[in-house]
Amino acid sequence: MIIEKYFIRSKHSIINIENTQVKSLKKKDISKTAIRAYNGKSIGIGSAIGNCDEAKLTAEARKALKKNIPYAFPPSSNRTESFVHLPQIIKEDDFVNEAQDIVSELRKSRPDFIFSHEMCMIESEARISNNAGLDLSYKNRYFELGLLIKEKKSSNIMDAFVDFHGKTYDKKETLKEIDRVCSAFNKKMKLEKKGRQPVVFLSEDGLIYSKLISELDGMKIGTKSSLFTGLIGKKAFGENFSFIQSCDPYTDFTCFFDAEGSVNNGYQCPLIENGVILRPYTDKKTAAEYKFQQTASAVGEFDAVPRSGFPGGRLKNTVKSIKELLGGKKAVLVYIASGGDFTPDGDFSSPVQLAFYFDGKDFLGRLPQIQVKSNIYDMFGKSFLGASEDKLSPISPCSFVAMEMDVSEI
Amino acid sequence: MFKFPKNLYTDVRIEDVFETRIAYTLNKLDENRTRKYSGAFIRVFDGERWYYSATTNIKGLQAEIDSLACVARKNPGILKNKTVKKMQVNDAKRINYAQNSVEKIKNSQKDEYLQSYFGRLNSESKIKMWRAIYSDRRVVKKFVSSQGARVEFDNQKCGAILSFDMAYKKKMMPESFQVCAKDFKSLFGHEEEYNSYLKKCFSFIEESVPVKPGRYNVILSPMTAGIFAHESFGHKSEADFMTGDETMKKEWAIGKKVGAPILTICDGGSHPDGEEAPFDDEGNIKKETFLIKKGILSGRLHSAATAADLDEEVTGNARAVNFEFEPIVRMTNTYIKAGNMTRDELFKTVKNGIYVEKLKHGSGMSTFTLAPSLAYEIKDCKIGRPLNVAVITGNVFETLNDISGLSDEIKIYSFVSGGCGKMAQYPLSVSFGGPYTFVKNMNVQ
């Protein structure tokens, strides 16, 4: 019998900011442990939140085998790998002072705005090990600063936001980027042209990928209930469009192994390449059942039986810079688009609550609220302009994705 | 009992949780698990800042309190602090689910209940993939404070979620059906509703056509009206968006006209199907709050801190998604009050338009969004062809004034999965509802 331990721990130090003031300090350190027992036919799981007695959990896992939850796949084995990166981004003793400095600077430099939300230091840990030679561990520390921005004279709940996360903290760049957003917000512009035009999304905006992700599910494709049924191996999108599942701990701040302890070569697996749908994402069960390649896409809560899910991904960059991609044209940069969606047929529409005119370098000014429309096959097909390598700012995790869309004022 | 540090305000919330989850995909058992655990959230306040800790080490709570107190500044005047004065000192026990706790129901009974739905899912050729989940959760919360508050209460939910992917010719469509109740025995008796819902979904995939984008008169079903109330206005009633913000205080002054005279929106109440929270997560009693009464802004939702800042009364709306989080201002059960027309009379007022029966999701900034999963054209005052609609949007301030008719009965909906998201806290269990609601001139895409 194979006995496997799956352990996750998240440790947070959080400074809450309200009304451009440090309002609260929070610490959280939560660990969760599951012991899995495999007998070749079934899986049994024993689990605990917080401190645990592993022998007791192992006994629970063995007992849980009687529930006959089918799991006839060999657990991952014979691989040892560890990713540990715990840089000292801000000294613990300086963390509150840094937050105070930021808000104090903002009160002086941008008295026309109110800033709120939080600054966090996050230490994320995961480990999966078993008596079949598997021992994978991941420990990463990173920094996050998310600020909701509200113009003082506005009656909106929020008008803009900034979100930085990474391995470094640069106060000067942070303040510069916040100032850039606020300045552009204050400069109102008219939408010069309605109809089809270049629209730029930030790469971290999940809205545009939501339909791709739901339809690339191996279970949906295997059961012929996906929009992409019958399209595996076929060109459905533009030549310049490639979509990659990626769990690269060096760039994505995510764990490099999935909930079954599977790892992709180079931590990546292309799902769509040059417009051709290569494969859906799968866990072991879905891959076996529908004869797809397994893509290390098992997800689930710490004590759940792993199941197929999308662990994270990105587009393949097509050019170095967004400026190059736009070729001197002015584009609509979608900064906040909340609540849009696709129809079952793949038509897409979303209001854009905050958009800027953008020349590939500068935010030229704020547009009125607009609406963007397209279709999944157009967005990533004939209308897809490309994805750029450069970032929104030196401290931003976001690069750019550009496509032509139908734009109108709301 | 804890030894609370002097010259500071301290409270401790301990949550004892029992959860079950049984899941099947296409008749195969995916998982069958129960969890039983405790966690605690501690808050220390020195009059200027809060110091929080979330922990599962229940035996070490005193040490955790002492550690937070070391960082806080001692404040001899803490009891006179206006936020602390808003903290009620309640001594009450409201345990409603000890006798009919889901923990007492055998796992095999839960499994059998879930399996009772499989027959129909297996027999329909349009359903290509399905997943069925039984879920339950009972939480017992114990709250104590340095002021002497001592409150213990519980809540419980259980239910089934049946999600399925349909295919018909080249059309694909995901849908789901949920049953939610506060105790296990109330889960039964939904077969007719389930069968009729499946039939409706099959007709939808067969007959749906893309909507012609434009401005339409729209009738929202009780469920979508509830989501509309929650998203479009409820979030704006959460007073933490107003603290320290003079513009918002003026803009949202009580007594201002914000909607049509027929519109009344409330949060709270004791509706049997509504979210249950006799106390909030800082020990204050949950009240029914009129947010809009006959089109006039009448109230807002508060924690102790926001009530102190705005010099208003607490409403018992400081809620945390679980023991890992601090309470923040959240809704509980948000609904539009009934009007005076029958459903038929209401439909007779809309010659041509769109009826929205069910939503995938909604969002609420100044421009709110509703993403329908089931929408229909209204032709000659009757429900007609099913329509594929991506999103309905509108400006909150304009749309509340465009509400032109309300039916005379309301329905409240609770869900066993999903919930409301705010900042990092998702999903918080909430309920919502309302009557059939006629809104003029909505932007449908």
Image (cartoon, rainbow, N blue to C red):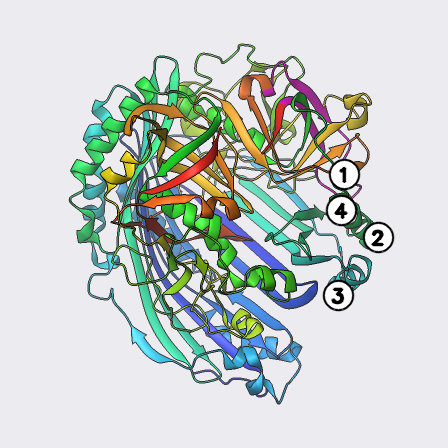
Q: Position of residue A222 (x, y in %)?
A: 40, 20
Kind of residue at badge 4:
Asn
- Which is nearer the N-term, disc 3 or disc 1? 3
Residue at 55 percent of width and 81 percent of height: B9
Is A389 a magenta residue? yes
- Which is nearer the N-term, disc 1 or disc 4? 4
Same chain shared by disc 3 and disc 1: yes
User: Is any part of residue A57 visible from this angle?
Assistant: yes
Q: Position of residue B94 (x, y in %)?
A: 29, 72
How far apart marks 1 and 4 lie (CA) works out to: 7 Å
- Which is nearer the N-term, disc 4 or disc 2? 2
Kind of residue at badge 1:
Gly
How far apart marks 3 and 1 lie (CA) works out to: 29 Å
Name the element at disc 3. Answer: helix
Point out the residue furthest to the top here.
Answer: A234
Kind of residue at badge 2:
Lys
Question: Which range of residues does the magenta coloring cover?
Answer: A379-405
Name the element at disc 2. Answer: helix
Q: Position of residue A115 (x, y in %)?
A: 69, 57
Question: Which residue does the numbered mark 3 point to in the structure image?
Answer: A100
Same chain shared by disc 1 and disc 4: yes
Question: Which residue does the numbered mark 2 point to in the structure image?
Answer: A172
